[in-house]
Image (cartoon, rainbow, N blue to C red):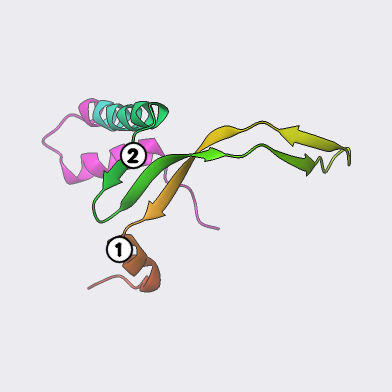
Amino acid sequence: MKQSLKKKDIAAILAAQNPEFPREDIEEMVSLIFSAMADALAQGSRIEIRGFGNFSVRPQKAREFINPKTGKLSTCDKSLRVVFRAGKNLIEVKRDPTPEG
């Protein structure tokens, strides 16, 4: 089973690649980046990271569903959801997962 890559892991990778910067500063920068992204999405902005992908907020319609535990019909109010669309470079990595070397 593949493990998840956590924010802490991203900071550790960056710290290993950039030993001239204190690890605490790198962890703070990673947190600031994700915080800025979350704030932008909360305001309805679109985030574009060239070569990686786009994040955007789209409306989700209200809908009815059957609760699997109770079997009763329930409703879900309309809301907003975050959508990710992979960029060209990321799609190419998915198609050819073999590492270069």
Q: Residues within 10 Å of mark 1 (few under 14, many from 20)?
A: few
Q: Is residue 42 above or below residue 99?
A: above
**Is 51 positioned to the left or the right of 75 in the image?**
left
In the structure shown, which secondary structural element does the residue marked by tag 1 occupy?
A: helix
Residue at label 2? 46
Count of marks, rendered view: 2
- Image coordinates of residue 21 in percent, x first then y, are 14, 32
Image quadrant assignment for residue 25: top left
**Relative image position of residue 89 (x, y in whole percent):** 28, 63
The residue pinned by badge 1 equals 88
Name the N-terminal-most of marks 2 and 1: 2
Q: Secondary structure at mark 2?
A: loop
For the residue marked with disc 1, what is the amino acid?
Lys
Magenta-span inclusion, residue 24: yes
Q: What amino acid does circle 2 point to?
A: Arg
Q: Nearer the viewer, mark 2 or mark 1?
A: 2
Region rendered in magenta: 1-26
Residue 21 is tagged as: none
Left or right of 43, for residue 79: right
